[in-house]
């Protein structure tokens, strides 16, 4: 019985171990040095960010609020410092693993390193996209409320969430994921919802739409506090909402009350308007009249 194959196998194993030990030691040295360098760079970045007041700058620009809206509680300076730390550490780890001739692991770490910049770009895109979406949503809400559209807040939220959805799809495509199906589906859904809302508004809310449009012209002609007389109705204008104008009237027994009139009624009918305004230096009242456009 020959033990030569066994001896050769054991010799090869011992030789491989002896050759691997220097590579392992060198790889560990590189990893330790890389960790120290990464730690020092992170400390320097934290110090610089504190000195320049980056946290306060981020708070003033609204980026921090946008990140909180996305569920991120950590400050942006700390996130940047941690990203640099782990990126450097991952780079040194890749070099150390490649030195140890772990080719598969090194290739995996290389792919992760190449993915990090795309992930950072996608995150920045989502943050600034959400800021833009919130700004546009709040702007639309404010404009709608200024013209007394009662559903202005819901309209602003719809615009905001729609923009965020498109930004998220764009960010996913930045990561290298094929989003053609997702983009097509999202476009179809938004178009369908928009068409449904448009059809509902056109066929089911024509009167409301006319009242909302008429409300703009009613506000141009009649002001709160002005007395109006329209047929059997007489009272002072309390407010003009999206579709109705509220008059303050005196009911039976002299009790005050309110009545809501469609804006189109004020716009299409002859309305007598009176307003009592004290003139400077005059002891009496001056009465003026106005009529709505026919």
Image: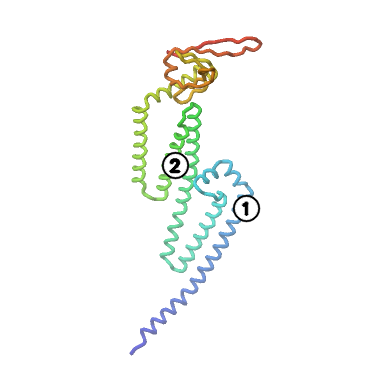
Percent coordinates x, y for residue 70 in the rendering: 49, 46
Dot 1, how many residues are within 10 Å of its Cα: few (below 14), some (14-19), or many (20+)?
A: few
Nearer the observer, disc 2 or disc 1? 2
Give the side of residue 45 with respect to residue 209, left or right: right
First in residue order: circle 2 vs circle 1? 1
Percent coordinates x, y for residue 54 in the rendering: 60, 46
Q: Nearer the viewer, residue 62 or 124?
A: 62
Quadrant showing the C terminus: top left
Please identify the quarter of the rendering in which residue 209 is found: top left
Q: Nearer the viewer, residue 111 or 285?
A: 285
What label sits on residue 47 in the rendered view? 1
Q: CA distance from mark 2 to mark 1?
A: 34 Å
Q: Nearer the viewer, residue 199 or 84?
A: 199
Residues at badges 2 and 1 in contact (C-beta under 8 Å)? Answer: no
Dot 2, how many residues are within 10 Å of its Cα: few (below 14), some (14-19), or many (20+)?
A: many
Total labels drawn: 2
Percent coordinates x, y for residue 24 in the rendering: 49, 71
Tag 1's secondary structure? helix
Tag 2's secondary structure? helix
Residue under the point 62% across and 9% down: 284
Quadrant showing the N terminus: bottom left
The relative height of residue 292 versus residue 116 in the rendered view (above or below) is above
Furthest toward the front, the residue is 253
Residue under the point 60% across and 53% down: 46
Residue under the point 49% across and 74% down: 21
The relative height of residue 259 versus residue 52 in the rendered view (above or below) is above
Residue under the point 48% across and 33% down: 141
Residue located beneath label 2 in the image: 164
Q: Nearer the viewer, residue 294 or 227?
A: 227
Give the side of residue 28 with respect to residue 199, left or right: right
Percent coordinates x, y for residue 217 in the rendering: 46, 19
């Amino acid at each position: 019985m020959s033990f030569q194959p066994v001896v050769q196998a054991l010799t090869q194993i011992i030789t491989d171990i002896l050759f691997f030990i220097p590579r392992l030691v060198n790889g560990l040295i590189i990893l330790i040095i890389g960790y120290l360098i990464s730690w020092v760079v992170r400390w320097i970045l934290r110090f610089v960010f504190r000195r320049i007041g980056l946290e306060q700058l981020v708070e003033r620009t609204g980026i921090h609020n946008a990140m909180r809206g996305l569920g991120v509680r950590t400050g942006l300076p700390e996130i940047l410092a941690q990203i640099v730390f782990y990126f450097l550490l991952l780079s040194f780890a890749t070099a150390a693993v490649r030195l140890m001739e772990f080719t598969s692991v090194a290739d995996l770490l290389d792919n992760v390193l190449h993915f990090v910049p795309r992930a950072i770009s996608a995150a920045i895109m989502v943050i600034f996209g959400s800021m833009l979406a919130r700004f546009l949503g709040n702007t639309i809400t404010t404009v709608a409320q200024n013209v007394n559209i009662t559903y202005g807040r819901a309209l602003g939220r719809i615009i905001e969430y729609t923009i965020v959805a498109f930004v998220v799809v764009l960010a996913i495509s930045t990561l290298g994921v094929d989003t053609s199906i997702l983009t097509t589906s999202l476009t179809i859904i938004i178009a369908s919802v928009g068409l449904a809302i448009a059809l509902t508004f056109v066929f089911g809310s024509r009167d409301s739409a006319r009242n909302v449009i008429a409300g703009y012209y009613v506000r141009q002609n009649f002001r709160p506090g002005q007395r109006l007389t329209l047929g059997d109705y007489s009272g002072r204008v309390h407010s003009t909402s999206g579709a109705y104008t509220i008059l303050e009237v005196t009911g039976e027994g002299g009790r005050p009350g309110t009545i809501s009139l469609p804006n189109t009624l004020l716009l299409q009918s002859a309305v007598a308007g009176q307003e009592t305004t004290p003139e400077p230096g005059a002891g009496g009242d001056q009465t003026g009249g106005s009529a709505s456009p026919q």
